[in-house]
Image (cartoon, rainbow, N blue to C red):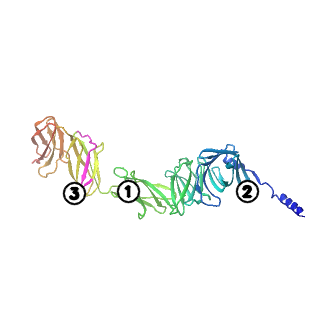
């Protein structure tokens, strides 16, 4: 009777279909991975949510999708055949080798042509693997500090500051995109990404289109409701970059400073409508902006210097610019306010000066100047045209200062003649010129509206003789 019951039970099992082998080749899987090299990017114990970054292990699938080679640290371990199948509603890949250590089966949970996530028995442990294909596709895994996958994280792909596109991580924390994906423009130019997730600090990093990245986010405040404002701060007068300029918005609680190139980047809430910049010596300037989530907006600041400027130049007796002259500006107490070294044009400038009198002096090896220093009053305005004239040491010459006898003011445009040489006084009343000859020489001084004067001046070879003369206004 027992044998009869067993026989009936077996017939019911067979004819009910429960004994069928529900397994068939999966051509779609084979097509997706043939010719691909799959690299192990992360793994975790089966049933454990925490991913751990991995490297060194990879599987190369043959061009027909039927053979494989297993590598560790680029060394060929072994190879065999691979069979892609569908079994009982699950997708599986059977990797079979003569070496038991190189044989394994993967139950595939999720896949596309660039990655797969699956479960397998590996080195006596039931594990989940995330494998990625070596290609020009940008891909990666986003996890928290404990390795838990972060699904729904926004990955903003950029080319410098231009947005290329935005994608989200899947339930495994994986993201991946290729150049043909909709909504992505010029992915081949992508060089950085920013990852956002509510409850986690944003993370930015440099990338390349063919790279894969294991990204760990720390808990903290997210910038999901922020955009990035970036740009340069320059001086409105000179156009030179400004270092140390403060850039901020709103009440100034969040701020950044420009670097040596005048560059800055500032995260700004989308609710803000303007940003501003200012410096110790530059006036505050605000610029209206429209901030959108995940976007970068360029705002350059051209800042007006605060205070007053003092400009001038240094020339030789032939009106050629003198470079590398040290120019020193001191305040009324003799304290050095600033120094400047002339460039090829002989010009100098001091900025952000207060409304007072400054002493400006010049010096350079191998030359003497007339004047060597000048008092310059600012008088509530910028000052320009401060001039110094130099003559080479060892030159035979004459220099001096000409003033009006009744006011003591310097006289500009006085004609000075000595031997075969002549020149005119500058606006500061000074002059200097080379003289051909030595001994007692006649010097004439003439200017319209003033009585001319004639002097006998002892000229010494190789030296510059200095004179001070007053001219009397004509009656």
Q: Callout 2: helix, strand or loop?
A: loop
Find residue 245 and name its label.
Answer: 1
Give me the C-alpha separation between circle 2 and circle 3.
91 Å
Depicted 390 relative to depicted 331: above or below:
above
Looking at the rendered image, the quarter that the N terminus falls into is: bottom right
> Exactly how many numbered labels are in the figure?
3
Sequence order check, earlier mark of 2 and 3: 2
Label 2 neighbourhood size at 10 Å, few (<14), some (14-19), many (20+)?
few
The answer to whether any part of residue 68 appears in the image is no
From the viewer's perspective, is 363 left or right of 161?
left
Q: Mark 2 points at which residue?
A: 89
User: Residue 98 at x, y = what percent?
Assistant: 71, 46
Q: Do the residues labelled 1 and 2 touch (CB within 8 Å)?
A: no
Q: Callout 1: helix, strand or loop?
A: loop
40 part of magenta stretch: no
Sequence order check, earlier mark of 1 and 2: 2
Give me the C-alpha separation between circle 1 and circle 2.
63 Å
Q: Mark 3 points at which residue?
A: 333
The answer to whether any part of residue 313 appears in the image is yes
- Picture residue at 46% right of the left edge, 62% below the top: 272
Task: State which region is magenta.
Answer: 318-337
Find residue 167 and name its label.
Answer: none
Label 1 neighbourhood size at 10 Å, few (<14), some (14-19), many (20+)?
many
Q: Please tell me in which quadrant of the rendered image residue 378 appears.
A: bottom left
Tell me which secondary structure the magenta stretch mostly adopts. loop
Sequence order check, earlier mark of 1 and 3: 1
Nearer the observer, 98 or 233: 98
For discs 2 and 3, the disc positioned in front in the rendered view? 2
User: Residue 244 at x, y = what percent?
Assistant: 37, 55
From the viewer's perspective, is 204 left or right of 39?
left
- Picture residue at 29% right of the left edge, 57% below the top: 307
Label 3 neighbourhood size at 10 Å, few (<14), some (14-19), many (20+)?
few
């Amino acid at each position: 009777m027992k044998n009869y019951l067993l026989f009936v039970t077996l017939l019911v099992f067979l004819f009910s279909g429960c004994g069928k082998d529900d397994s068939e080749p999966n051509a779609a899987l084979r097509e997706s991975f043939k010719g691909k090299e799959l690299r192990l990017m992360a793994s975790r114990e089966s049933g454990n949510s925490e991913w751990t970054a991995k490297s060194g292990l990879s599987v190369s699938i043959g061009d027909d999708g039927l053979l494989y080679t297993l590598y560790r640290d680029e060394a060929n371990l072994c190879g065999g055949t691979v069979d892609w199948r569908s079994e009982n509603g699950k997708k599986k890949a059977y990797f079979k080798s003569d070496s038991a250590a190189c044989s394994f089966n993967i139950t595939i949970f999720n896949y596309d042509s660039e990655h797969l996530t699956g479960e397998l028995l590996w080195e006596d442990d039931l594990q989940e693997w995330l494998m990625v294909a070596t290609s020009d596709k940008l891909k990666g895994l986003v996890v928290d500090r404990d390795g838990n996958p972060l699904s729904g994280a926004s990955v903003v792909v950029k080319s410098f500051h231009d947005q290329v596109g935005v994608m989200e991580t899947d339930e495994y924390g994986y993201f991946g995109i290729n150049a043909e994906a909709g909504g992505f423009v010029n992915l081949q130019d992508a060089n950085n990404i920013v990852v956002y997730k509510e409850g986690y600090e944003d993370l930015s990093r440099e990338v390349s289109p063919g790279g894969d990245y294991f990204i760990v986010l720390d808990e903290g405040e997210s910038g999901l409701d922020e955009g990035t404002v970036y740009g340069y701060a320059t001086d409105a007068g000179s156009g030179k970059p400004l270092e140390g300029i403060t850039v901020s918005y709103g009440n100034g609680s969040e701020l950044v400073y420009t670097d040596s190139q005048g560059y800055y980047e500032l995260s700004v809430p989308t609710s803000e409508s303007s940003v501003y910049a200012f410096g110790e010596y530059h006036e505050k300037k605000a610029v209206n902006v429209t901030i959108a989530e995940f976007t970068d907006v360029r705002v350059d600041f051209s800042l007006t210097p605060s205070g007053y400027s003092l400009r001038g130049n240094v020339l030789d007796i032939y009106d050629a610019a003198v470079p590398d002259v040290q120019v020193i500006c001191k305040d009324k107490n003799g304290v050095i306010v600033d120094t400047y070294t002339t460039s090829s044009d002989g010009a100098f400038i001091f900025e952000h000066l207060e409304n007072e009198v400054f002493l400006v002096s010049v010096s350079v090896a191998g030359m003497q100047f007339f004047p060597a220093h000048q008092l310059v009053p600012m008088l509530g305005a910028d000052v320009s045209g401060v001039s110094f004239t130099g003559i080479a040491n060892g030159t035979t010459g004459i220099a001096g200062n000409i003033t009006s006898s009744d006011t003591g003011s310097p006289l500009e445009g006085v004609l000075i003649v000595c031997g075969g040489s002549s020149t005119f006084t500058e606006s500061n009343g000074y002059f200097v010129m080379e003289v051909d000859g030595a001994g007692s020489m006649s010097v004439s001084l003439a200017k319209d509206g003033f009585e001319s004067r004639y002097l006998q001046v002892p000229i010494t070879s190789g030296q510059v003789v200095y004179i001070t003369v007053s001219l009397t206004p004509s009656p």
